[in-house]
Image (tube, coloured by chain):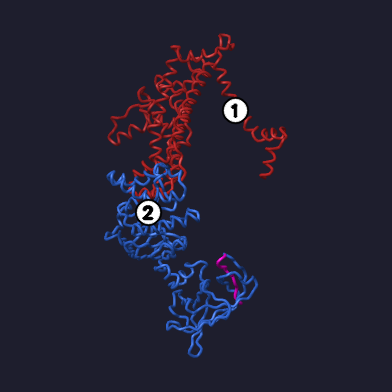
Chain colours: A blue, B red
Amino acid sequence: MARLNLDQVSKSFGTAEILKAVSLSIEDGEFVVLVGPSGCGKSTLLRLIAGLDPMTSGTLQIGDRVVNDLAPAERKIAMVFQSYALYPHRNVRDNMTFGLKFSGMKKDEIDRRVAEATRMLQLGELLERKPRDLSGGQRQRVAIGRAIVREPDVFLFDEPLSNLDAALRVSTRVEIARLHAMLRATMIYVTHDQTEAMTLADRIVVMNKGRIEQVGAPLDLYFTPANLFVAGFIGSPGMNLFSAHLTQAAETLTATTGFGYALPVKGATLASAASVTIGIRPEHVLFGETPYQAFSARVDLVERLGEISYLYCATVNGTPLIAEWRGRHTPSVGDTVKLSADPGTIHMFGADGTRVPDAVR
Amino acid sequence: MPELTQSALSSKSGFGRLALLVFFLGPAVVIYAAFSVYPLIATMALASFTTDQAGAYHFAGIDNFILLLTDKDWRGPFWNALGNNVLFFIIHMLVQNPIGIAIAGLLSLPALKFRATYRTLIFMPTMLSVVIIGFAWNLILSPLWGVSEGFLKFFGLGSLFQPWLGLEGSALITIGLISVWQFVGIPLMLIYAALLNIPEELVDAARIDGLSHLRIFFHVKLPLIMPTIGLVSILTFVGNFNAFDLVYAIKGALAGPNFSTDLLGTFFYRTFFGNQLQLGSPTMGATVATAMFLIILMGVCVYLFLVQRRLERHSF
């Protein structure tokens, strides 16, 4: 169990800067998920923490040790890979004990650890089998078992569920959450799947282009995204974003979109004539008569999922948006609907893309 | 298309089915039969005849083989050539293949620069004509004008120099090592390709398990490329027991000194075509050729039925 501290960590491959001065503190026992689009540097960051690649600059601390120059095995970490990376020529038991044997650990201790991992992951019947005789889910469990027997301070997961089918992904996700509750170890988990991120994480780290965009609890990211990138990345389908510009009339500042949606705005940081972005999540769009400012849109496509349906709409100037409809009797394609949103659910972002807090009245 | 194939194969008309088989399989069968099966059978058939003084052929059954294995004039050279051939094979297995594996392991290290250059340089001798190789090494090792003596002297090792190609005790080993130098690129390439096939994540996992690069090589990579090493071994075996050209280029058909570099290939050549005081004999030549075929066949069978079945192939 240990804290983990990244200070100004950078990584370049030749002239390409993959990670740009990333700083992050992870508490003991915390489950942190690194999430971001492919190429954002999240896997690179995990490999740096594991010690598989050297960092270009910066400091990495695990517990109270600076581990920059330590080999992966000396960092007291364990890693679970997307492809499972089991040794194909060894059976399940040997896969788990492989590293321990080479470290010169006593046999009793190895047996104790294997027995414990076996019990925890229900690997009992699989111990003598070779990886090729296992299903994908079983292989991933063995890979997790191999991590557990190392009794590491920090567990690293690199997209561990990406190779599993949808049903197994859900059950293995639950299993990992259960494992975290049981072991109380520090875990760092990389994924591009925001459902995994939201469900597993104590804190989510959203990364983009080698930088950290925002760090926060899942619901904080959802309700108060720090910038446009996080706003668009967290939530599915993504937040509707409309560009607007501010006009001052008498005492009130108003944000007006190209299709005539006008929102009264407060906030000392905003000035007239500035351009802003208004964000409304599909699930926060309201239909029909409401006390709020409204605009009209035409329904282009209806996606029925059962409990909810998504209406793909276009405003009068053609700006696309998605609205969530609850219930059975959806508007039909071609209908014009009147849309609005509670100001409390509307997000506003300044010209530089950062959030303007409490901007909408 | 699927409907077409289905209907063509399941059609009731036996003739249509036959026509289809002939169309697709015919050319391969004809070419294989004409250029592989027929020469093999003809050779074996020829081995069961003898010629008399007048040059007429008589059926002799397995007399030629008995002659080859028991006659005092035949059995000595035959066992000598076979023994030399076994030694030639052992040299390749002990020197060529381990060096090939080691260089492939070095080439697959991620930190290595100029990889393609090394690969090309090491593979270069394999592409050279064997006549050039034989000539070049004859010059290099020549005690009269070769560079090797001066080269050793430069390092203060001049006293070690011997005319290796001319000594009975060392000629075969020397030619074996020249052959190793020539062909090391082939196991290198095959094993390098197999090593590239091992996923990077597996090596990462082993590093996290605390294995050094050397241990990763011996405990993870090597077991996984065993099928390729098996393949390399059997290719080496077949190649060595068919070897002829390098000995012929360096030492001529007499495989001197005193037949100490004689392989089955050169022995066969002298038997079939004759040499100096020896008359050529097509029937005894065919006998030697058949014996060589049977030896290689036995080796390949041992590999296929005893070795290969124990090798596990791994998919990643």
Q: Residue at x 26, y 61 (%)?
A: A64
Give residue A152's position: percent from left, percent from top. 32, 54
Q: Residue B187 carries which label?
A: none
Residue B32 found in image quarter:
top right
Q: Relative to the observer, which residue lies in front, B245 or A128?
A: A128
**B128 vs B40, nearest the viewer:** B40
Label 2 lies in what chain? A
Q: Which amino acid does label 2 sit on?
A: Met
Q: Which residue is denoted by mark 2 in the rendering?
A: A79
Residue under circle 1?
B35
Direction from residue A73 to residue A199 in the image, left or right: right
How packed mark 2 is, by other alpha carbons closer than 10 Å (few <14, some 14-19, many 20 or more), is: many
When the figure is inspected, residue B113 is found, relative to residue B272, above or below; the finding is below
In the displayed structure, A327 sits above or below B40; it is below
SS at circle 1: helix
Part of the protein shown in magenta: A306-316
Q: How many labels does the image show?
A: 2
Q: Is residue B156 magenta?
A: no
Q: Where, by quadrant of the figure, is residue B43 drawn?
A: top right
How far apart are labels 1 and 2 at the CA level?
57 Å
- Does A88 sit above or below residue A194? above
Dividing the picture into quarters, in which one does residue A307 lie? bottom right
The kind of residue on which mark 1 rests is: Phe
Residue A168: x and y, percent? 47, 54
In the image, what residue occupies the spot 31% across and 57% down?
A153
Vertical relation: A296 (above or below) A132: below
Residue sitting nearer the eye, A49 or B107: A49
Chain letter for mark 1: B
